[in-house]
Image (cartoon, rainbow, N blue to C red):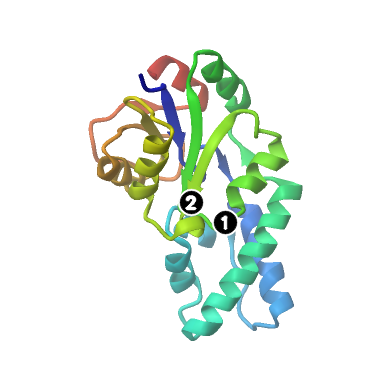
């Protein structure tokens, strides 16, 4: 018999790291000696949820492919270090809700389009590793989010799992993976589908 499982998106679902991501990327850009305007929190929020290669294309379109990839890698490296130390804006009730879901017997996992090390930085800063049993991301295997949701669900033998995310692409990925979806409506985007919605993270306890 399979286990009950909930899989989570990161940005706009568990936290908002955009301000500190922008700070870390501006530090990286300055250290790399690349002359360009500073990235804003809004710049980062505008690309969150995309895969890392798509983010580089959007933010550094003037650079050649090799320079773009090198700058992206440096930004991501510094970002992980910065977020591990400084964190982001954690949404209210995340830890208490994690704890309550685990007590109800749910296995909790994270699936994101982020770079390798980003999820780990989040877990380390907030000391959440005891709550999250599995994770997967684009940076680890270059797979799209729908594939990674399915991968995590299958390797943990989850029975009728649900994915929690905040934007249309998260819903589309859950459909591609064949799992149910809950919209974190307090996050960064809207979802054009008739799905359960939560207006704050602790409402998950009622919806699931």
Residue beneath the point at 59% across and 24% down: 93
**Residue 184 in view of the camera:** no
Residue beneath the point at 42% across and 67% down: 54
Residue beneath the point at 70% across and 36% down: 126
Q: CB under 8 Å between callouts 1 and 2?
A: yes
In terms of sequence position, does the residue under pointer 1 or pointer 2 come before the other? 1
**Residue 136 in view of the camera:** yes
- Which of the pair 178/188 is nearer the observer? 178
Residue 136 badge:
none
SS assignment at label 1:
loop
Dividing the picture into quadrants, the one containing residue 4 is top left
SS assignment at label 2:
strand
Residue beneath the point at 66% across and 56% down: 80
Quadrant of image for the N terminus: top left
Image x and y of residue 158, in percent: 38, 28
Q: Is residue 69 above or below residue 198?
A: below
Image x and y of residue 109, in percent: 50, 35
Question: Is 67 displayed left or right of 145 in the figure?
Answer: right
Query: How much space separates mark 1 and mark 2, taking CA atoms?
Result: 7 Å
Q: How crowded is mark 2: few (under 14 residues within 10 Å), some or many (20 or more)?
A: many
Please give the residue where the numbered disc 2 appears in the rendered image. 137
Residue 116 badge:
1
Image x and y of residue 31, in percent: 74, 76
């Amino acid at each position: 018999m399979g286990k009950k499982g909930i899989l989570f998106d990161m940005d706009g679902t568990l936290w908002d790291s955009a301000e500190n991501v922008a700070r870390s990327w501006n530090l990286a850009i300055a250290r790399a000696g690349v002359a360009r305007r500073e990235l804003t929190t809004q710049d980062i929020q505008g690309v969150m949820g995309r895969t890392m290669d798509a983010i580089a294309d959007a933010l550094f379109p003037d650079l050649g492919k090799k320079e773009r990839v090198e700058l992206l890698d440096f930004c991501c490296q510094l970002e992980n270090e910065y977020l591990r130390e400084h964190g982001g804006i954690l949404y209210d009730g995340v830890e208490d809700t994690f704890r309550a879901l685990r007590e109800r017997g749910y296995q909790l996992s994270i699936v994101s389009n982020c770079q390798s090390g980003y999820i780990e930085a989040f877990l380390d800063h907030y000391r959440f590793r005891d709550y999250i049993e599995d994770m997967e991301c684009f940076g680890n295997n270059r797979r799209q989010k729908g594939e990674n949701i399915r991968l995590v669900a299958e390797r943990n033998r989850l029975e009728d799992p649900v994915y929690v995310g905040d934007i249309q692409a998260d819903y589309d990925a859950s459909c591609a993976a064949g799992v149910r979806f809950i919209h974190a409506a307090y996050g960064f985007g809207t979802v054009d589908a008739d799905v359960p919605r939560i207006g704050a993270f602790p409402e998950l306890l009622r919806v699931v």
